[in-house]
Image (cartoon, rainbow, N blue to C red):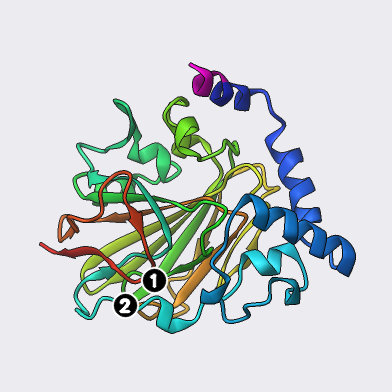
Amino acid sequence: MKQKILALLFYILPHHAISQLMFIGARIRWTPAKNAIIRIYTSLNPVKMHEAVEEDMFAYESLNAFFTRALKPECRPFDDNPDNWLCPVDGEVSQAQAIENGRVFQAKGQSYSLLELVGGDEELAEIFKNGNFATLYLSPRDYHRIHMPTTGTLKRMRYIPGRLFSVATYVVENIPRLFARNERSVCYFETEQGPMVMILVGAINVSATETVWHGLIDSEAKKIRSFDYSDQDIVLQRGDEMGRFNLGSTVIVLSTDRMQIDEKITGGNEVKLGQCLAKPS
């Protein structure tokens, strides 16, 4: 009951105002303030600094630079079967299973419309209506760069404005249709294993989302914006960085029925970048 009440409080919080303050605070570069912020942050969120390319947490110019730190490649070996899709992030599996007649499972009997999730794009919703999905939650202590599950050609991206509810488990369990209500960017790729969508879901305190082809995505937009890349030949290789979160959130990966979610990708399990996410059917 306590967690339900806490979750419901997110309805009245000024999501965007709080996130804007975090955007500013996370980019403070004055050394005494920046170091104090990082010290407080790491005391609350234990980080495995031995995995980072730069192991000295105070060497980063800001909390945001620390938060989006690079990892040593050897710390995240990739699944060696090139036909398998890689897990794109470190984090925890929120849910991963089949999409049933255009409905995506959220938690505790709740589901939401795939059409709503992709911002009303009927073509995308039709492609994936009987496919599979994996919802991957990144906590504040996790690595926050997002990588490609497989080699893909970017065709289009759709930015969908919305709320910034927390994506912590207790909130997801108590706020219906959360992922279809939060701000998000829907990135559509064509791959050798069929169409793939990666959805970067914003959340409170996630002060910015960015991709390698677009840069910082303007979260102040009040309407859906679509970007067509079909004539630009943007190809990202398996394992390449495709984007990053600033202060954590959720990635949803959609596949058609040509790929099946790996048996280890189940709700509540911890996952690491590079492990097998899905295998050919």
> On the rendered image, what quadrant is the C terminus found in?
bottom left
Q: Nearer the viewer, mark 1 or mark 2?
A: 2
Q: Residue at x 72, y 32 (%)?
A: 14
* Residue 35 placement (x, y as % from top left): 80, 65
When the figure is inspected, residue 104 is found, relative to residue 79, above or below; the finding is above
* Residue 227 placement (x, y as % from top left): 53, 61
Q: Residue at x 37, y 64 (%)?
A: 272
Q: Residue at x 39, y 46 (%)?
A: 121
Image quadrant where residue 264 sits: bottom left
Residue on which the image places disc 2: 78
When the figure is inspected, residue 189 is found, relative to residue 239, above or below; the finding is above
Between 246 and 52, the one nearer to me in the picture: 52
Residue on which the image places disc 1: 148
Where disc 2 sits, the SS reads loop
Image quadrant where residue 16 sits: top right
- Magenta segment: 1-5
* Residue 224 placement (x, y as % from top left): 56, 46
